[in-house]
Amino acid sequence: MIFKSPAKAALAPIYMASSNDYKDQTGEYLHMFNPKRMDEKVYDALEGERLWSASADLWARIDRRAAVMP
């Protein structure tokens, strides 16, 4: 696979973070500077809770001192 350099890969997120074109806009990302909608699971609150729980469990197994926020 061919990957962009970190400097080139950073251009799209920097543009989205600093451009008025994306002010107050969420739920999209840029792929090759073309707007893309995220996978539908991203917008499902139950899926988000499941991901948070699984991530917290994994973190706790890696570092027993981890303080997990609900």
Image (tube, helix red, strand yellow):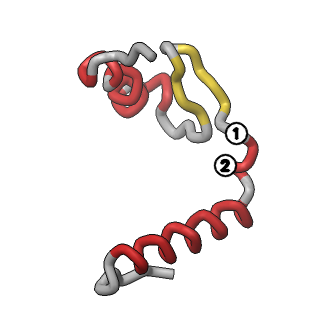
Q: Residues within 10 Å of mark 1 (few under 14, many from 20)?
A: few
Q: Is residue 48 above or below residue 21?
A: below
Answer with left or right where residue 44 lies relative to residue 35: right
65 vs 52, nearest the viewer: 65
Task: Identify the residue at horizontal 29%, vertical 85% (top origin).
Answer: 65
Q: Secondary structure at mark 1?
A: loop
Three-letter residue code for mark 1: Asp
Single out the residue that lies furthest toward the front: 1
Determine which quarter of the picture holds residue 53. Answer: bottom right
x%, y% of residue 67? 35, 83
Q: Residue at x 38, y 33 (%)?
A: 17
| Residue identifier under label 1 | 39
Task: From the viewer's perspective, tell me whether residue 1 is left or right of residue 7.
Answer: right
Left or right: residue 41 compared with residue 59 = right
Q: Is residue 22 above or below residue 55?
A: above
User: From the viewer's perspective, is 3 left or right of 50?
Assistant: left
* Quadrant including the N terminus: top left
Q: List x then y, in percent, for residue 54.
A: 57, 70
- The residue drawn where x is 73% and y is 66% is 46
Q: Quadrant of residue 19?
A: top left
Q: Are marks 1 and 2 in contact (CB under 8 Å)?
A: yes
Where residue 2 sits, quadrant-wise, is: top left
Regarding mark 2 in the picture, which secondary structure is present there?
Answer: helix
Return the residue at label 2.
Answer: 42
Q: How many marks?
A: 2
Where residue 52 appears, as percent x and y from the top left, is: 56, 68
Amino acid tagged 2: Val
At label 2, counting other C-alpha atoms closer than 10 Å, the crowd grade (few under 14, some 14-19, many 20 or more) is few
Say if 39 sits above or below 69 in the image.
above
For marks 1 and 2, give the CA distance.
6 Å
> Mark number for residue 52?
none
Q: Is residue 47 above or below residue 13?
A: below
